[in-house]
């Protein structure tokens, strides 16, 4: 669970040339991400979801499901056990509050940001990868066919579109990859959108006009500089304190556009340059943030959480070097396939390699390691509580304790006291 609580000294003054210690910067970042907000006293609801989304701005999606889909985990880290249907309804049911698009890679983004991402949609044909950009010039009739197919039949997956395109009676001669590229290009350009996800996590595409709210579609399109400024604002508010490269990375903005937006927001007084202890590059804060006196968090953080998207910033802020090892060959991994950092107070104090074994009804802790300088007993007690909470949210009845890692023995003992802890190799 996450214990929260913070009180704040005077905020940074406007246009001050403030100098922040590493710990002050860290606490500003954690507060901006919602880790000092109070946990709901009951079952989290829509207002709690909106509060988190208002903090972080978007949720990254990823197909890996060894523990839980990536977009569900940041809400758990901040709210505790919440009904995942809450997020599903916001993303895929009317009145739709979120939509899928390329934000920070594949993301769930508030629909209110749709107008500010249209510049990216307009550049889809030039910037799309994997041969998608060739389709509009090489096979424009395929794009027309996909749109007509969706218009007539409603939401369809790429696989369903591919099967229809391959039917002999159509006699198009379109292969699997071209059809897939066509629908992905239409998604990138904003002409189609994700109406929902099926049980295999595949997108069901439909015409954007049938997915997004009419008032959003009717909102005027800002020019590109205005769009860049808004996206940098969202990034700055979500990060709390960040260097220019991290403000850019939040929505994967082009270098020159992001730099111009940062400069314009500084000139307008919306962004404030700051010096952060140990940082070679200047930092920026949005407005005049308060610095919490303390952060009382105790929660696991997803590899895809916006708090740690930019790994260099994570290292500068937390003295915590973190790399995801999903794509590292098994025999070369240092810690494991799906490793989550454990946040205790305002520090990352441990990391655990986790897997949900749904058939056995167990949360497997494949390995556990403490960060240097933190007492194993104290970390194990807090981590055991967090693991039990996570298992309960995932509807798993047992937490299987690790044998790997310097935290394994202490964590086994802590889990045993909680009636958990079958040991796994």
Image (tube, rainbow, N blue to C red):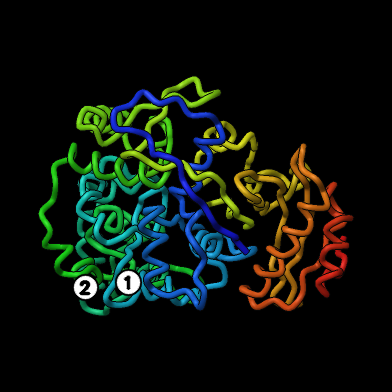
Residue shown at 57% from the left, 49% from the top: 295
Q: Position of residue 21 (x, y in %)?
A: 53, 29
For disc 1, the marked residue is: 195
**Side of 152 where 327 appears, left or right:** right
Q: Nearer the viewer, residue 169 or 315?
A: 315
For disc 2, the marked residue is: 210
Q: Quadrant of residue 367?
A: bottom right
Q: Which disc, if any, is residue 236?
A: none
Residue shown at 77% from the left, 74% from the top: 398
Task: Please say whether residue 63 is visible from this viewpoint.
Answer: no
Q: Residues within 10 Å of mark 1 (few under 14, many from 20)?
A: many
Q: Nearer the viewer, residue 29 or 325?
A: 29
Residue shown at 15% from the left, 69% from the top: 214
Dots 2, 1 in contact, CB < 8 A: yes
Q: Nearer the viewer, residue 309 or 254?
A: 309
Question: Where 169 falls versus 376 (above or below)?
Answer: below
């Amino acid at each position: 669970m996450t214990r929260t609580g913070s009180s704040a000294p005077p905020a940074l003054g406007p246009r001050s040339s403030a100098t922040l210690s590493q710990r002050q910067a860290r606490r500003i970042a954690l507060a901006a991400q919602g880790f000092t907000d109070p946990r709901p006293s009951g079952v989290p609801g829509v207002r709690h979801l909106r509060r988190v989304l208002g903090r972080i701005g978007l949720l990254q999606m990823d197909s890996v499901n060894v523990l839980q889909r990536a977009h569900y985990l940041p809400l758990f880290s901040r709210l505790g056990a919440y009904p995942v249907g809450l997020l599903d309804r916001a993303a895929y049911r009317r009145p739709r509050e979120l939509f899928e698009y390329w934000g920070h890679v594949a993301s769930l983004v508030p629909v209110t940001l749709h107008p500010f991402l249209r510049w990216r949609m307009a550049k889809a044909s030039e910037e799309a990868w994997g041969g998608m950009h060739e389709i509009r010039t090489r096979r424009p009739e395929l794009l027309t066919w996909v749109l007509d197919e969706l218009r007539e039949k409603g939401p369809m997956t790429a696989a369903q579109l591919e099967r229809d395109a391959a039917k002999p009676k159509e006699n198009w001669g379109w292969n699997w990859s071209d059809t897939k590229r066509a629908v992905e290009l239409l998604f990138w350009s904003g002409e189609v959108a994700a109406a929902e996800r099926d049980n295999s996590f595949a997108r069901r595409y439909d015409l954007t006009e049938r997915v997004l709210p009419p008032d959003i579609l009717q909102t005027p399109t800002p020019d590109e500089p205005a769009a860049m400024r808004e996206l940098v604002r969202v990034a700055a508010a979500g990060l709390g304190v960040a260097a220019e490269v991290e403000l850019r990375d939040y929505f994967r903005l082009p270098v020159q556009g992001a730099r111009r937006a940062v400069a314009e927001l500084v000139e307008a007084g919306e962004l404030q340059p700051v010096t952060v202890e140990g940082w070679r590059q200047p930092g920026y804060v949005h407005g005049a943030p308060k610095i919490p006196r303390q952060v009382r968090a105790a929660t696991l953080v997803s590899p895809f959480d916006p708090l740690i998207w930019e790994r260099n910033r994570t290292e500068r802020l937390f003295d915590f070097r973190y790399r995801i090892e999903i794509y590292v060959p098994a025999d070369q991994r240092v810690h494991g396939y799906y490793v989550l950092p454990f946040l205790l107070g305002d520090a990352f104090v441990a990391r655990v390699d986790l897997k949900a074994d749904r058939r056995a009804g167990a949360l497997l802790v494949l390995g556990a390691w403490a960060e240097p300088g933190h007492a194993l007993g104290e970390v194990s007690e807090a981590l055991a509580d967090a693991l039990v909470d996570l298992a309960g949210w995932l509807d798993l009845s047992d937490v299987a304790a690790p044998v790997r890692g310097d935290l394994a023995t202490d964590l086994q003992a802590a889990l045993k006291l909680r009636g958990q802890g079958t040991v796994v190799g």
